[in-house]
Amino acid sequence: MDTNDKFILLLNENDKTAIRKTEKELNTSITSSAELSSKVRANDILNSGNALHLKNLGIVIIDKEVEEKISKLSLKRSSTIKYYEKSRLIFRPVAELDLIEKIRKSAEDSLQNIRDLEDYLRSKQNQNNDRFTWGLNAIKMNETDLDGQGVDICILDTGFYKEHPDFVGRDISGKSFVPNQFWEDDRNGHGTHCTGTAAGFKSSENGIRYGLASGARIAIGKVLDDEGNGATDWILNGLDNCIEKNYKVISMSLGAPVGIGEAPNPIFEHVGNMALQNNCLIIAAAGNDSNRPGLPRPVSMPANSESFMAVAALEKSLKVADFSNGGINVSNGGKIDVSAPGVGVYSSYSPNALGNKLYASLNGTSMATPHVAGLAAMYFQAFPTLSASDIWRKLEKRAKQLNNQQIRDVGNGLVQAI
Amino acid sequence: MKRFIAQLDTKVEKSGNIFEILSKENIKVEQYLENIDVYVLRSSNDIRDNKLLRNVFEIKKEFTISEEE
């Protein structure tokens, strides 16, 4: 049925008499809509040549073949027809479908754009991840813009290779507390490696980022000799200097083994508390004397002091490293506080050391410690009004808990960037 | 001569000239680290039980890098 082939008649009266009269005048048969059912539809009636009376509306739909008769009847004074018009295409379902189709197409285009953007961001993310060491990815350094700007971070170690190409233009100061040895040539390499992790940036060798607080001011304290060993007074001199200079973060990747049940050295406990009172956080390596799966050895001195933050080492699988010491002497305070990447850690190195190289991958709680120190500098940057004790708590609170790892071994878990 | 780190007993801290007092005990003050309030001392005696001092430890070259070979 074509809508344009019909006329719509509005009757003056909506009763049987008017219907019969209209039928007679137009010489057609009008079927009431009361006859409609699931078997008899409006189109069936209209297609059979009958008109349809919509009884509830007083309207008759009729074929246009009787147009002339309708016109004449409507002009009669006694006409039953009040008004008539040709059926019009008021609703345009096809056009609406077109519109829906356009909207659908637009939505699909948008969806495709979202997919493309998503793919782009994922690939960019992967590229970024590829440009960080595994350790920096693990602590979410790829998701932060903080760099420790304005914070002084001190590395108490074997010194630092000051001519390293990755540190050109950096604000670096230093002092040696080891008789007759200098802080700025690092003939061991260990100090340059730890400094690189804590406060370096990226490798000029391969572009991989290995350092955390790349905006921090670096202070070097040589407290270990070129063989990597240190006397108590050298270390205490280094710590005294840090407090004198008001450094915020001290990284100590060194230690001396202690026995099971051995209490922390009260001098270091006292020094750690003095540092905290001066708003300085000391972060120290837990030590590497263990050989899992056997019972781990206790946390070394000075990390076993409660006022020092003790750091354990993790493998890439985020399992505690076999060598990493554990919280065995907890009753004396020697617990692990947090853990950080400490196996296969790539960082800067000193060409004055054995191997004559600018970079090295090393293992140890020594390598985990500067990860935490670098983050501490970034936390101080982010929360400049917080105390060192507050920063310590924040580092612990934000650490990622590690499945299937004991608190004894990993403390509060893997430290995380903010 | 052995070298020690130590802190002064709290009573001694308030008792005047520290160097003079320790000198009478045959203890030489090599260095005072004022920011951490720790003394580096030298003596031919074992001063670990000296009543003028507390937290006395003989200085050893016992610390080492925590790098796993």
Image: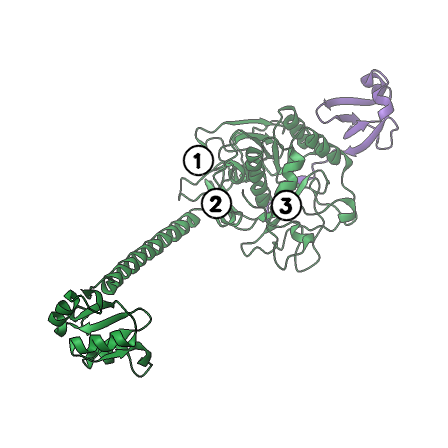
Chain colours: A green, B purple
Q: Same chain for marks 3 and 2?
A: yes
Residues packed near mark 3 inside 10 Å, few (<14), some (14 to 19) or many (20 plus): some
Q: Amino acid at mark 2?
A: Glu
Residue A160 place in picture, x, y as percent: 53, 33
Q: Considering the numbered disc 3 on the image, is that residue within a helix, a strand or a loop?
A: helix
Q: CA distance from mark 1 to mark 2?
A: 22 Å
- Given the image, what chain letter belongs to the residue carrying mark 1? A
Disc 1 target residue:
A166
Q: Same chain for marks 3 and 1?
A: yes
Identify which residue is drawn at 84% across, 16% down: B16
Q: Point out the tag, 1 or 2, that comes first from the N-terminus.
A: 2
- Mark 1 vs mark 2: give the one in front: 2
Residues packed near mark 2 inside 10 Å, few (<14), some (14 to 19) or many (20 plus): some
Identify which residue is drawn at 20% across, 82% down: A48
- Given the image, what chain letter belongs to the residue carrying mark 3? A
Q: Point out the tag, 3 or 1, that comes first from the N-terminus.
A: 1
Q: CA distance from mark 3 to mark 1?
A: 33 Å
Identify which residue is drawn at 50% across, 44% down: A141
Residue A191 place in picture, x, y as percent: 56, 37
- Asked whether residue A230 appears in the rendered view, the answer is no
Residue A122 place in picture, x, y as percent: 39, 53
Q: Considering the numbered disc 1 on the image, is that residue within a helix, a strand or a loop?
A: helix
Disc 3 target residue:
A397
Q: Same chain for marks 1 and 2?
A: yes
Disc 2 target residue:
A143
Q: Amino acid at mark 1?
A: Asp
Residue A311 or residue B46, whichever sits in front: A311
Q: Quadrant for the N terminus of chain A, please.
A: bottom left
Q: Amino acid at mark 3?
A: Lys
Image position of A335 with respect to B2: above or below: below
Residue A315 or residue A136, whichever sits in front: A136
Residue A109 place in picture, x, y as percent: 29, 56
